[in-house]
Image: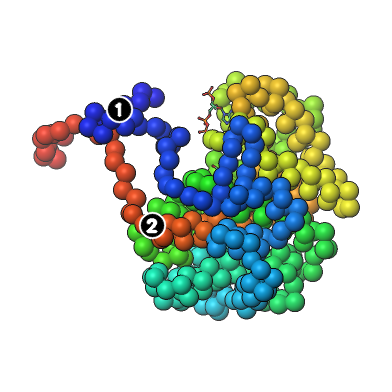
Amino acid sequence: MTVAGDLKTGFEFKPGLEGVPATLSSISYVDGKKGVLEYRGIPIEELAANSSFLETAYLLIWGNLPTKDELNAFEHEIRYHRRIKYRIRDMMKCFPETGHPMDALQASAAALGLFYSRRALDNPAYIRAAVVRLLAKIPTMVAAFQLMRKGNDPVQPRDDLSYSANFLYMLTERVPDPLAAHVFDVCLTLHAEHTINASTFSARVTASTLTDPYAVVASAVGTLAGPLHGGANEEVIDMLEKIGSKENVRPYVEDCIARKAKIMGFGHRVYKVKDPRAIVLQNLAEELFEKFGRDRYYDVAVEIERVVEEKLGQKGIYANVDFYSGLVYRKLGIPTDLFTPIFAIARVAGWLAHWKEQLNENRIYRPTQIYTGTHGAPYIPTEER
Ligand code: SDX
């Protein structure tokens, strides 16, 4: 597309704001050429190996690793707030079973705001309460919709289980294997934050109007749902099932390239090497396969990665976070259309960190545009059109 410049401001329009700084932030850092991702300066590989999702969420939101007492208090508050109001459960019972879980999550996240006082944004206690409620209740709502769309009553959270073990319990009504709970928790850490991606940008724009944090998260959930963003993990599984075998990989990839169709789980606006999260997720998948058996599509996935690298590596197109995450979730027995809601459960931590950071030095987002329309057009009466 021709890119117009604005004579007055001197700025050039960049489609998708590619390469245009939209904020100052100290929450996370990505080097797309070196494949580096850091949360508050700590490499993602360190956090994946040593931290937990809740400890990582605390780091992202409050800017420092918590002491043992701070983490215990935070985990205790989250456990206490995991339950959702019966009115929200009753509302979710009216949702159609065929509805997408991301639409159910966006509706129920916005509904949370109906129960809590609006916009005491200058009160640190309000900020902390909103952080705790959203981190605690989003998993409960995702699991509740899953059971209700099957015609069952949702189960209450179990305070004796960790954050990730409790989510898998609420989802499957079975206490998960410790390895499954651990791998799931690492997946949440890997998906928690990623600088100013589309859904985080939505969160910051919504936050800048000083609306309530529940509306901020609902706005971000709607943005994450798209197949070019968080919805890609679901599309990857559909692609693997469609290809079916290693032999079909090369013709499939060549056909996509010929049609200029996007291959799901590949490419990234920032990474021009393999996404560091994809590397960790691939290792997690192999860890699960060792204990619970290999996924029949894993070899197809490895072959797709090999062929795409051969064909598109020189264009900087490599596997991103969404390429292997679905295989991990499948092995954990999670339905495909819940992969993106799980991405949202994790990314609530990053959205809340950006919500707080935006409030620290807020200025409402209101960019300009380069007008390409006409001026002084006449109004033509209906009968003359
Ligand atoms: C996430 O931003 C983030 O940080 C997001 C995320 C996060 O943690 O928040 O990392 C999570 O959203 C990961 C991305 C998940 N999406 C997908 O896997 C969908 C498939 N990927 C593409 O849609 C694409 O790569 C994007 C959207 C991710 C990035 O697109 P860009 O930067 O706008 O790149 P583009 O569409 O302008 O493509 C540039 C070139 C084009 O070729 P040319 O026209 O220049 O010849 O690269 C090609 C594209 O055709 N290309 C691909 C491709 N991605 C880009 N070709 C084939 N398959 C692909 N996946």
The residue shown at (42%, 37%) is 20
Between discs 1 and 2, the one toward the N terminus:
1
State the mark number for residue 361: 2
Q: Residues within 10 Å of mark 1 (few under 14, many from 20)?
A: few
Report the front residue among 114 and 199.
199
Residue 169 located left or right of residue 214:
right
Q: Is residue 225 above or below residue 131?
A: above
What x and y, as percent, mark residue 224? 53, 50
Q: Is residue 216 above or below residue 249?
A: below
The residue shown at (79%, 69%) is 175
Q: Is residue 110 above or below residue 229?
A: below
Q: SS at mark 1?
A: loop
Read off the residue under disc 1. 5
Q: Give the Cα separation between the discs numbered 1 and 2.
A: 29 Å
What x and y, as percent, mark residue 54? 65, 64
What x and y, as percent, mark residue 88? 52, 73
